[in-house]
Image (cartoon, rainbow, N blue to C red):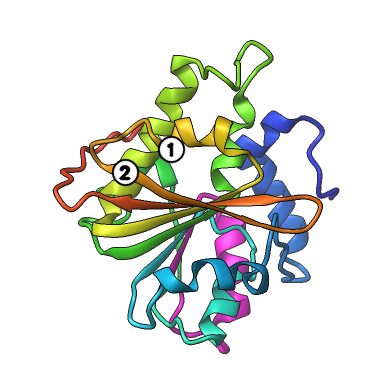
């Protein structure tokens, strides 16, 4: 199966990913959208500790958690709504990364469906938000997002906040520039705060948004994607 979808909006569908991972699972290979751990570690290591509980949101078949595991981060959980993906990656890692958890679940229904309480110090999103935002249409102005798109971002961040401990970090890696993406990360100001934006890459730049869950945050469950 070709890596690229026929239409961008397909990246927001579980059907596309299931079909793709069913094809790729025979080889049990990894594929990294955007950057790998080697490219990101210098920018985000200061926010990570060896004893941290780390959640990968929409993990796909990225090598990120494996590479982090080799660098000493043993307490990691990967969530994805594609069952073929989770099954293939669990099989791939069962011997070399036995402590990594692989969980079949929807990032828009994390709490209480997948995790009953806030338990993570760090939640990592590498391209996941970009995938579900491919539902944007030509009518959606990137400078002034529609309420529909803001609602999608709000529902997602509500779930992120629900599984993070107070003071926990949400680290988001994307291709989208701050003038467009930052406003979507600030739709839940009473719970998630954008602290810093970093850049990685030569020529084609990617952006790393370092966000924090407020210490006094009281997360509300949403359970709705759109």
Task: Name the spot of residue 198 as percent of width and height, x first.
Answer: 56, 54
Task: Name the spot of residue 110 as percent of width and height, x first.
Answer: 34, 48
From the viewer's perspective, is residue 97 above or below residue 9?
A: below
The magenta-colored residue range is 77-100
Task: Name the spot of residue 146 as percent of width and height, x first.
Answer: 50, 15
Q: Is residue 173 left or right of residue 114?
A: right
Of residues 47 and 24, the one drawn nearer to the viewer in this rendering: 47
Residue assigned mark 2: 192
What residue is drawn where x is 64% and y is 64%? 62
Task: Name the spot of residue 143 as percent of width and height, x first.
Answer: 58, 20
Of residues 116 and 198, the one drawn nearer to the viewer in this rendering: 198
Q: Is residue 116 left or right of residue 18?
A: left
Residue assigned mark 1: 185
What residue is drawn where x is 72% and y is 71%? 28
From the viewer's perspective, is residue 113 above or below residue 224?
A: below
Identify the secondary structure beneath mark 1.
helix
CB of mark 1 within 8 Å of CB of mark 2?
A: yes
């Amino acid at each position: 199966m070709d890596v690229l979808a026929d239409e961008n909006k397909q990246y927001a569908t579980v059907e596309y990913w299931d079909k793709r991972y069913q094809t790729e699972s025979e080889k049990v290979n990894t594929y990294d959208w955007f950057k790998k751990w080697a490219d990101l570690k210098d920018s985000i290591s200061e926010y990570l500790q060896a004893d941290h509980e780390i959640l990968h949101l929409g993990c796909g078949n990225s090598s990120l958690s494996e590479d982090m595991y080799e660098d000493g981060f043993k307490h990691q959980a990967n969530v994805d709504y594609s069952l073929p993906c989770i099954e293939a990656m669990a099989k791939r890692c069962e011997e070399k990364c036995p402590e990594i958890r692989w969980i079949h679940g929807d990032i828009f229904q994390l709490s209480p469906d997948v995790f009953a309480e806030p338990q993570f110090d760090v939640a990592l999103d590498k391209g996941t938000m970009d995938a579900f935002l491919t539902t944007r249409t030509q009518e959606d102005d990137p400078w002034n997002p529609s309420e529909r798109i803001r609602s999608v971002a709000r529902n997602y961040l509500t779930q992120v906040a629900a599984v993070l401990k107070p003071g926990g970090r949400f680290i988001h890696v994307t291709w989208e520039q701050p003038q467009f993406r930052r406003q979507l990360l600030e739709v839940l100001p009473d719970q998630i705060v954008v602290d810093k934006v970093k850049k990685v890459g030569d020529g084609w730049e990617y952006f790393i948004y370092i966000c924090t869950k407020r210490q006094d945050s009281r997360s509300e469950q949403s359970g709705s994607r759109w």
